[in-house]
Image: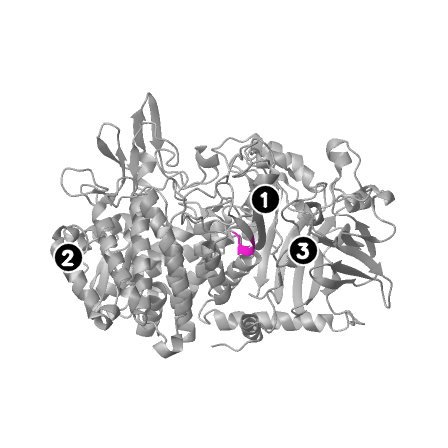
């Protein structure tokens, strides 16, 4: 175990001796346009609460800001506001297009970068790029509305606003002197050649809880002192904090209250409203701020003219130390110490064999994941009642989430993207944890716990999907993430947390039962589930009634359930080693997996999902007249059955012989179960057994397509749709209409699911990660004796470990500089590729162009794209060309570690007396 200062802080947080996680980047980047703030009859959240309203209208459920920071209940908030003396408003929050304004849906139109963070947020750093000239709000809207779906987004750089480097680089750093004492350093660089003036406003405010009936109203007030005045923040729950600002800036106060006069023409209860500081700074309205220097929102107002090419720093401090006489005396020393400690932490966490460029990418990936935490508050029952709806209030029907009245979320949660997706998604979160546990095991486990908590998990056993529709269906990957986390912790500490695993298993059993009861229409072990995260991948909208009538047997839904079974089997087998009551559960999941796996192949005249001619899996359309046909779209739908694989070392069968005996009896009674799938009784390398839908023949056939560069195998990872469909689109006719699926390497050309989520060609990191896991599983069973041509038709044979390594290399190549110094994820943008102030700033996009690797979709989806850091960590140890020998990369020990973390090698288990 490492003993860096940050590891010590993690230990203290775990032990409860110091709450180092209390303060962090828990402020959203967009609270406007969210479901929580929507009280419209139509459910049009984007238009009900617009960006234009956000500066004047108090939020109900949360807050937002630039480089935001808050306590873990978002009661006291701190963020940065800026004004360049050209904008019509001060820049308090990030601007972006609403779902109806962008030609590919909603999209943030700002340049900001998360550069670093430790897991306790003892040190954090980010960068915001702010133009000298007026921000082109209207130009961005008009420019995107003028473009059709087949054109790229009109981006901020396209407007010319950054021409001649006429912008400020605004770096914000946070450093904790203690768990209740935070230093804030703002460093502004004028990148232009001429002097430019900037107003810098570190802003402190309270989330408006009093409007909802909170008993005591907090207050901010100035206390005159030596050497400078200080703002005291008094909160009834948190106590008193002091906000120091170096250099004697003016403190300007207002209230976090709605400006009803501006919004609806009705006088406000107070003359000091949410946008009062804006009106004071921009318009000189002295009556907009409170001369008594008190309120619920305050800004330290600095004004600086910065010469071209030079910089200026601004310092602030938020602390509960009332006796701190010289708040800036040791400021620089503490900041420097935290930077060094962050470097030491990542030097201990990331492999030394990573190149400096790869280390920087991995560190920015983890920084983005850690910055993307948000305090998420949504009491659905209260929200429904406030709308006049809910289970006992039927005056108005809620446009969404009417059956989730039990839901009460008030937690810090890892978000996919705090602007584009400032709400959690259950299956995204499972992938986030695989990356987050690289640096913070406790937080990762706690995140998995949340989705299974009674305030989240539906009484029926369904996991919540996302706030736009909690009742939608996400792929069931939570069990896999739980087992992954358990094994990673066991590798790190020498023992698995069996108590946590047992608690998770019990809740996951409820979710498994929900799937079996709700998504297996006929009880035949074939599953549906609708879009299952793959929004635009199908012929039809799979979450809506089919135009043909009937229903779909979904290859992906059934494969997800096979993997769910395997994960539950892993958990129950692990628990049964010291808790015998779980042995029958292990047997139950063995049998259930066999039924599901066999159901995918449907021998005989029935149309199964496996197509023998094509050597691929497809969805099956079941028509009302009893007819059936495969929808022959070569997509991730047909790849996911390959991912439903888990290798076992026989530990349980040796410890509990009755389980093995029962398993053999079941196979003897049902020989049909193993006719078409891999024989689970057949031993592999070192006597291992494998649960897999694909036998060796089918595995080779699917791999031949997966590794074909003319189909799925892009230079930058696995495409979501085969490139075969570029010249051979799949076409289906029904009801006088044509439904077409063609290969689209970039953005979608369909409005399905809003049109801003495209699985018809681009590369997605999470599914690629699952494919890597599957390849490692197969290799641990087949060993080096199994080789495959990679790429297909190249004449180059690789073991499956080497294939996994090659896929990891291609995924990493998205972000790393190539031989020409280009980062493929930056696309053809000359500024990002060449400018020294841009080229090393990494954006972790939602998905990537299937051919060029250019980043697409949400630009800060570090949530799951950030797992590239975990992938890099797993495969570190030299160039891929050096690893084509008989030994896997890093030698046998490295492979054992990989199998431990991404498959089911032995894990130390506590002795029975230690469990008590």
Please tell me the numbered disc located at residue 90: none
Marks 3 and 1, how far apart in space? Answer: 19 Å
Q: Position of residue 213 (x, y in %)?
A: 69, 47
Please tell me the numbered disc located at residue 382: 1
Q: Position of residue 580 (x, y in %)?
A: 29, 69
Q: Position of residue 560 (x, y in %)?
A: 33, 50
Does label 2 or label 1 sit earlier along the sequence?
Answer: 1
Q: Residues within 10 Å of mark 3 (few under 14, many from 20)?
A: some
User: Residue 545: which quarter of the image?
Assistant: top left
Write the start and end of the magenta stretch as one range.
410-415
Tell whether position 869 is magenta: no
Q: The C terminus lies in which quarter of the figure?
A: bottom left
Please tell me the numbered disc located at residue 667: 2
Residue furthest top in the image:
736
Does label 3 or label 2 sit earlier along the sequence?
Answer: 3
Q: Classify residue 848 as left or right of residue 738.
A: right
Q: Mark 3 — residue?
A: 75
Whether residue 488 is visible to the viewer of this picture, yes or no, is no
């Amino acid at each position: 175990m490492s003993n860096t200062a940050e590891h010590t802080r993690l230990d203290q947080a775990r032990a409860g001796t110091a709450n180092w996680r209390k303060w962090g980047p828990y402020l959203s980047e967009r609270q406007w346009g969210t479901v929580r703030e929507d009280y419209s009859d139509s459910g049009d959240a984007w238009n009900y609460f617009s960006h234009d309203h956000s500066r004047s209208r108090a939020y109900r459920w949360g807050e937002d800001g630039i480089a935001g920071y808050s306590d873990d209940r978002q009661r006291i908030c701190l963020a940065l506001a800026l004004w360049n003396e050209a904008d019509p408003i001060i820049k308090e929050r990030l601007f972006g297009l609403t779902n109806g304004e962008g030609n590919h849906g909603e999209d943030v139109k700002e340049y900001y970068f998360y550069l670093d963070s430790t897991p306790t947020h003892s040190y954090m750093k980010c960068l915001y790029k702010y133009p000298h000239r007026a921000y082109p709000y209207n130009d961005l809207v008009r420019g995107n509305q003028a473009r059709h779906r087949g054109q790229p987004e009109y981006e901020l750089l396209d407007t010319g606003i950054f021409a001649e480097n006429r912008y400020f680089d605004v770096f914000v750093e946070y450093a904790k002197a203690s768990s209740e004492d935070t230093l804030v350093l703002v460093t502004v660089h004028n990148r232009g050649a001429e002097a430019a003036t900037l107003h810098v406003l570190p802003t402190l405010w309270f989330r408006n809880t009093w409007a909802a009936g909170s008993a005591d109203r907090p207050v901010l007030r100035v206390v005159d002192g030596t050497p400078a005045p200080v703002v005291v923040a008094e909160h009834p729950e948190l106590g008193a904090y002091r906000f120091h600002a170096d250099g004697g800036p003016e403190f300007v106060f207002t209230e976090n209250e709605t400006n009803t006069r501006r919004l609806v023409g009705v006088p406000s209860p107070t003359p000091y409203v949410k946008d009062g500081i804006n009106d004071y700074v921009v318009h000189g309205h002295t009556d907009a701020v409170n001369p008594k220097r008190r309120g619920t929102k305050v800004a330290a107002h600095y004004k600086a003219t910065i010469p071209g090419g030079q910089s200026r720093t601004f310092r602030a401090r938020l602390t509960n130390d009332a006796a701190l006489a010289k708040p800036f005396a040791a400021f620089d020393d503490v900041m420097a110490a935290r930077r060094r400690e962050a470097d030491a932490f990542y030097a201990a966490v990331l492999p030394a064999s990573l190149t400096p460029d790869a280390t920087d990418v991995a560190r920015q990936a983890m920084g983005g994941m850690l910055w993307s935490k948000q305090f998420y508050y949504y009491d659905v029952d209260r929200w429904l009642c406030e709308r006049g709806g809910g289970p006992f209030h039927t005056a108005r029907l809620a446009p969404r989430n009417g059956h989730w009245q039990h839901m009460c979320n008030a937690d810090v949660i890892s978000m996919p993207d705090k602007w584009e997706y400032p709400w959690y998604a259950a299956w995204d979160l499972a992938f986030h944890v695989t990356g987050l546990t690289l640096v913070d095991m406790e937080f990762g486990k706690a995140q998995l716990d949340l989705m299974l908590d009674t305030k989240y998990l539906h009484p029926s056993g369904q996991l919540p999907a996302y706030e736009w529709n909690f009742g939608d269906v996400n792929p069931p990957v939570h069990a896999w993430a739980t087992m992954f986390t358990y094994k990673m912790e066991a590798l790190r500490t020498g023992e698995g947390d069996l108590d946590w695993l047992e608690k998770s298993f019990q809740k996951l059993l409820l979710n498994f039962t929900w799937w079996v009861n709700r998504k297996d229409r006929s009880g035949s072990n074939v599953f549906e589930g609708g879009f299952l995260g793959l929004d635009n991948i199908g012929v039809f909208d799979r979450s809506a009634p089919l135009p043909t009538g009937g229903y779909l047997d979904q290859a992906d839904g059934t494969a997800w359930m096979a993997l769910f079974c395997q994960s539950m089997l892993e958990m129950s087998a692990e628990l049964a080693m010291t808790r015998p009551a779980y042995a029958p559960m292990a047997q139950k999941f063995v049998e259930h997996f066999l039924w599901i796996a066999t159901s995918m192949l449907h021998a005989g005249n029935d149309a199964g999902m496996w197509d023998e001619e094509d050597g691929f899996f497809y969805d099956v359309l079941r028509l009302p007249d009893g007819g059936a046909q495969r929808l022959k779209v070569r997509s991730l739908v047909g790849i996911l059955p390959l991912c439903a694989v888990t290798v076992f070392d026989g530990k349980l069968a040796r410890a509990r012989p009755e389980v093995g005996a029962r398993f053999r009896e079941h196979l003897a009674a049902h020989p049909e179960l193993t006719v078409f799938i891999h024989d689970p009784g057949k031993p592999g390398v070192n006597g291992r057994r494998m649960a897999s839908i694909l036998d060796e023949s089918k595995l080779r056939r699917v791999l031949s397509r997966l590794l074909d560069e003319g189909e799925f195998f892009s230079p930058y990872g696995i495409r979501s749709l085969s490139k075969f469909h570029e010249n051979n689109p799949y076409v289906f006719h029904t009801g006088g209409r044509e439904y077409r699926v063609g290969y689209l390497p970039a953005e979608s050309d369909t409005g399905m699911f809003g049109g801003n989520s495209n699985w018809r060609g681009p590369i997605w990191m999470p599914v690629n990660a699952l494919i890597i896991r599957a390849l490692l599983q197969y290799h641990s069973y087949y060993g080096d004796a199994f080789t495959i041509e990679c790429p297909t038709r190249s004449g180059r044979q690789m073991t499956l470990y080497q294939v996994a390594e090659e896929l990891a290399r291609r995924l990493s190549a998205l972000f790393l500089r190539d031989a020409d110094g280009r980062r493929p994820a930056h696309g053809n943008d000359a500024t990002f590729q060449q400018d020294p102030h841009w080229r090393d700033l990494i954006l972790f996009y939602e998905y990537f162009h299937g051919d060029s690797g250019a980043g697409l979709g949400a630009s800060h989806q570090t949530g799951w794209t950030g797992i590239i850091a975990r992938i890099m960590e797993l495969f570190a140890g030299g160039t891929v060309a050096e690893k084509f020998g008989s030994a896997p990369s890093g030698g046998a020990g490295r492979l054992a570690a990989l199998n431990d973390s991404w498959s089911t090698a032995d894990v130390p288990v506590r002795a029975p007396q230690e469990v008590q």
